[in-house]
Image: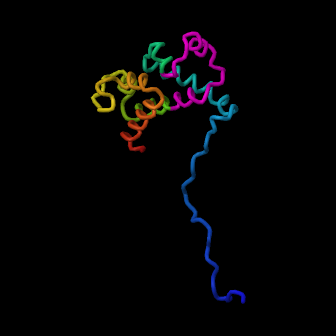
């Protein structure tokens, strides 16, 4: 027997939301890495200059790049980076941005070199922490700063 004409059919649609997830960047796609690599390297070298990184420190933050590769990248940033290197640079750009939101320009650029009493750093500078801890340490510093600025 057909449903009575007076009953409404239950809605099975998911409720609408104003939340829109950010577009996902697929770093496994070579085309995406090609699109991002040059600007990532240029941004990294600009940050390295602002933070007054020594070349060996900058090379370690990039994941242990050889001296010859590092200087070649610096002269000619038109190359395609691996996922790991783009991810590292992305964390460093986020750290740089968060520092400049939290502090004035001078302190923001000095912060990575200053000894830090936060238990996370154990008296070391955030730079030392990130160099010794690699990608996961960069992620942790990024999260710490995002939490401090209320973004987490």
Q: Give me the residue at 38% from left, 41% from top.
A: 147
- Residue 53 lies in what quarter of the image? top left
The x and y percentages for residue 82 are 61, 27
- Residue 36 lies in what quarter of the image? top right
Chief secondary structure of the magenta portion: helix
The x and y percentages for residue 93 are 49, 30
Q: How many marks?
A: 0
Q: Give me the residue at 56% from left, 28% from top.
A: 84
The x and y percentages for residue 142 are 43, 34
The x and y percentages for residue 129 are 38, 25
Q: Give me the residue at 57% from left, 22% from top.
A: 42
Residue 63 lies in magenta, yes or no? yes
Q: How is the image coloured?
A: rainbow
Q: Tell me where the magenta segment starts and ends, as one range.
A: 61-90
Residue 26 lies in magenta, yes or no? no
Q: Is residue 149 above or below residue 85?
A: below
Q: Give the position of the N terminus as an image quadrant.
A: bottom right
In this rendering, position of residue 151 left or right of residue 67: left
- Residue 152 lies in what quarter of the image? top left
Residue that sits furthest to the right in the current view: 1
Q: Is residue 21 above or below residue 3?
A: above
Q: Give me the residue at 51% from left, 18% from top.
A: 64
């Amino acid at each position: 027997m057909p449903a009575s004409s007076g009953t409404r059919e239950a809605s099975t649609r998911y409720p609408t939301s104003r939340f829109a997830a950010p577009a996902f960047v697929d770093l496994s796609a070579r085309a995406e890495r090609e699109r991002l690599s040059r600007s990532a390297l240029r941004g990294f070298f600009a940050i390295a200059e602002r933070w007054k990184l020594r070349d060996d420190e900058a090379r370690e933050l990039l994941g242990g790049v050889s001296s010859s590769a590092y200087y070649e990248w610096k002269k000619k940033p038109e190359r395609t980076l691996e996922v790991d290197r783009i991810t590292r640079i992305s964390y460093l750009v986020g750290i740089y941005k968060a520092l400049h939101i939290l502090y004035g320009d001078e302190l923001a650029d000095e912060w990575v070199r200053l000894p830090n009493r936060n238990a996370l750093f154990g008296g070391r500078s955030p730079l030392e922490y990130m160099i010794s801890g690699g990608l996961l340490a960069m992620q942790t510093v990024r999260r710490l700063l995002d939490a401090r600025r209320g973004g987490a």
